[in-house]
């Protein structure tokens, strides 16, 4: 079956439709494998997006070397565009001359698209809706984290004097997570929600403060924030 890509060139509203079979046939589509050897002996830098599924191979830049600003912006913009195609594995090759970009989607052969000022492509295939199954898994994971935070919030074990958070903040009342960062006079500086959580652990509860990346800290934050769903952020509000 032929897979059809629609490539939308924003700059000149030029719409091109490219079929993989045609591209693979004319030999200009480049290498059919997705390993980075496909760039041959050229000097390249591989930049990977945070989901690990998108890569931009920048030709003419050494690995570990800072790119010139204009090039770095171009790569960042390209990665952001590619990130819209959540589930897909995409490799983009950015040649030194930057007249065109080569793209490979989910291990398919590379196709060449014209470069423009704006990153040009919207693959018609992308942007699919998340499935019900995915949404259920994600909601369950989020709820699990919040439930863990709820349990900790009601657990005197966080401190040493038998007092738990909920005894002073029933249903997370008066925790105001939407007002952070904000200046707190007891610390004489602007702080984050987690700093106030630790302040309360150390002070009224006489416990040992949690590390900022402690999963307990994350869970407590998650619970407190979840109680203010829909509330507008208002950093600094007193
Ligand atoms: C003995 C009562 C008491 C306990 C127990 C307590 N707090 Fe507090 N908490 C306070 C008071 C009083 C303040 C107000 C401090 C201030 O703003 O000067 C406060 C402030 C806070 C704030 C900032 C609120 C704001 O308006 O910005 C957060 C967040 C918070 N507490 C979270 C917690 C958490 C999480 C726990 C449990 C680990 C906890 N507190 C335990 C009394 C308590």
Image: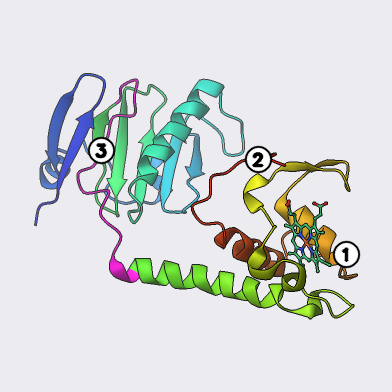
Q: Which SS type dominates the magenta stretch?
A: loop
Please name the residue shown 69% across and 57% down the image: 175
Vertical relation: 130 (above or below) 6 = below
Residue, disc 3: 122
Classify mark 3: helix, strand or loop: loop
Along the line of sight, which residue is nearer the eye, 158 or 167?
167
Q: CA distance from mark 3 to mark 2?
A: 36 Å
Please name the residue shown 34% across and 20% down the image: 117
Q: Earlier in the sequence, mark 1 or mark 2?
A: 1
Q: Residues within 10 Å of mark 3 (few under 14, many from 20)?
A: some
Q: Which mark is residue 202?
A: 1
Residue, disc 2: 235
Q: Residues within 10 Å of mark 1 (few under 14, many from 20)?
A: some
| Residue 197 percent coordinates (x, y) | 76, 60
Q: Is mark 2 within 8 Å of ligand 1?
A: no
Q: Which residues are magenta?
A: 115-133
Residue 124 lies within the magenta run:
yes
Q: Are marks 1 and 2 in contact (CB under 8 Å)?
A: no
Q: Nearer the viewer, mark 3 or mark 1?
A: 1
User: Quick one: quadrant of the N terminus?
Assistant: bottom left
| Residue 206 percent coordinates (x, y) | 90, 70
Quarter assignment of residue 167: bottom right
Please name the residue shown 76% across and 68% down the image: 168
| Residue 105 percent coordinates (x, y) | 28, 49
Q: Earlier in the sequence, mark 3 or mark 2?
A: 3
**Could you tell whether 2 is left or right of 27 in the image?**
left
Q: Earlier in the sequence, mark 3 or mark 1?
A: 3
Please name the residue shown 14% across and 38% down the image: 18
Residue 112 lies within the magenta run:
no
């Amino acid at each position: 079956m032929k897979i059809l890509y629609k490539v939308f060139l924003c700059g000149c509203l030029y719409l091109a439709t490219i079929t993989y079979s045609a591209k693979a046939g004319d030999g200009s589509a480049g290498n059919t494998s997705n390993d980075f050897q496909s760039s041959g002996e050229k000097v390249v830098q591989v930049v990977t997006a945070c989901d690990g599924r998108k890569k931009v191979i920048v030709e003419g830049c050494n690995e570990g070397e800072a790119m010139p600003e204009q090039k770095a912006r171009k790569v960042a913009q390209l990665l952001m565009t590619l990130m819209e195609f959540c589930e897909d594995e995409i490799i983009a090759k950015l040649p030194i001359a930057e007249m065109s970009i080569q793209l490979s989607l989910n291990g398919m052969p590379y196709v060449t698209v014209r470069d423009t000022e704006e990153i040009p492509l919207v693959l018609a295939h992308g942007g699919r809706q998340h499935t019900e199954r995915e949404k259920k898994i994600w909601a369950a994971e989020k709820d699990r984290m919040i439930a863990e935070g709820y349990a900790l919030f009601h657990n005197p074990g966080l401190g040493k004097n038998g007092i738990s958070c909920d005894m002073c903040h029933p249903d997370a009342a008066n925790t105001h997570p939407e007002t952070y960062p904000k200046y707190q006079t007891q610390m004489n500086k602007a702080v984050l929600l987690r700093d106030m959580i630790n302040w309360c652990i150390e002070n009224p509860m006489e416990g040992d403060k949690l590390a900022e990346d402690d999963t307990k800290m994350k869970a407590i934050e998650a619970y407190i924030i979840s109680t203010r769903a829909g509330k507008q952020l208002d950093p600094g509000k007193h």
